Structure formats: C-alpha cells, structure tokens
Image: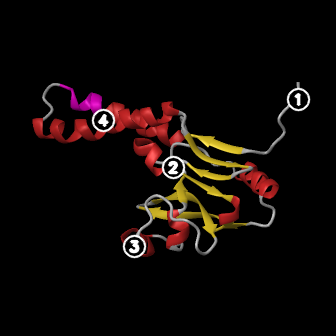
Amino acid sequence: MTRNTSPVYEARYGWDPKTMRIVVVSALFTAALLLPGMPLYLRILGLPLFGVGGLFMAFVAMSRKVAFRVDETGVLLGGSPARYKTTTAHVPWNDITGFVLWRRPAGVASLLYVGLARREGAPALPGDGPKARAVLGMLTPVSPDVAISSRVVTGWRLDKDRLNAAVAYFAPDSFMQDEL
C-alpha cells in the first residue's frame, strides 16, 4: 500500500475556537431570553438573532464542507455554507499569479482573509460585478480583484505553513503576499 505524500492543502468548516464561542454565547443568550419575566420585545428580537444564529453556526461547523483547497488542479474557494453550491469557485493554476493573506478591520478586532491574485482576463467568479467591485474598493484594503477571490477564515483554520508548502509544490512560480 502506498502512502499519499502529496502536499494537498484542504481546510474544512468545523469547530474552531471562534465558532465554539459564538455557539456557546448564543446558547446562553437564548436560555436567558427564555427565562420568566423577560420582556416580549427582547424575546422577539433576541430569539431569532441568538437562537437561529447559533443554530446556523453549529450547522456550518457540522457540515464539514470544504472551505479552501489547494491541489494539482488549482484552488477551490469554498462558498458560503448557506449557499455553498452557488458561491463555491474553482480557480485553475493558469489563472493564478499569487496568494494574498490580508485583514479587514471589524470593530475592535479584524477578520483574516486568504485571497488570490489572478491574471488579467481570468473568468469572473461568483459575486463579481460592477456594484460588488465598487463596494469592495471602498471597504477592503486590497484590490477588488483580490477581494472577490478571497475567503474569510471563519469557521475553519488556516495553517500557513501547510498552505505555503502546497503552493510551493503545485505552483512554485506564484508568490505569497502576507499583508498581516
């Protein structure tokens, strides 16, 4: 029996620390909202937010769908778990010139993204359009091209060393830009 030594990089949605915190906090708030004497307006506003939101995050973690994959065919940008099929995109190696790790401020914290630099004229990805580009141009510290081909690292873990090894193996001519 031969052992697969290919440095394929694959990250799946699962129980990362941020997802666990969100689910636990959502469960605590939901339980508090169900206590006797809680005002009706708080229940009406809070139960959908925390109850449904917490259940959705648990669904995402348990789905184990591919969030990001680097292999011999290119890069799979896993989609939003709520609309996985329509938002997932495969980008072949001949369309990729590099990788960009970047952050977007989110209140007092920031969100980590992994994105692709793609060649001029590469086919459009899901969500690409003039309105999306205009908004992303104002909201992100990277170009709209990179932002459209990016995935937020939420609900899965990014292993930079394994990602670098896979990129070096499958696309030694591409670059890794770390804007962290």
| Percent coordinates x, y for residue 58 in the rendering | 43, 32
Query: Horizontal placement of 152 versus 96: left or right?
Result: left
| Residue 104 shown in magenta | no
Q: Residue at x 88, y 24 (%)?
A: 1
Q: Check disc 2 and report the residue beneath it.
A: 88
**Which amino acid lies under the numbered mark 4 shown in the image of this protein?**
Val
Work out how far the residue at label 2 is from the one at label 4, CA to CA, in angstroms.
24 Å
Q: Which mark is residue 82?
A: none
158 to 12, vertically: above or below: below
Q: Closer to the camera: disc 4 or disc 1?
A: 1
Work out how far the residue at label 4 is from the one at label 1, CA to CA, in angstroms.
46 Å
First in residue order: circle 3 vs circle 4: 4
Q: Check disc 3 and report the residue beneath it.
A: 130
First in residue order: circle 3 vs circle 1: 1
Residue contact at pointers 4 and 1, CB within 8 angstroms: no
Q: Which mark is residue 52?
A: 4
Q: Is residue 119 visible?
A: yes
Query: Neighbour class for label 4 at 10 Å: few (<14), some, many (≥20)?
Result: some
First in residue order: circle 2 vs circle 4: 4
Q: Which mark is residue 2?
A: 1
Work out how far the residue at label 3 is from the one at label 4, CA to CA, in angstroms.
32 Å
**Magenta region: which residues?**
29-35
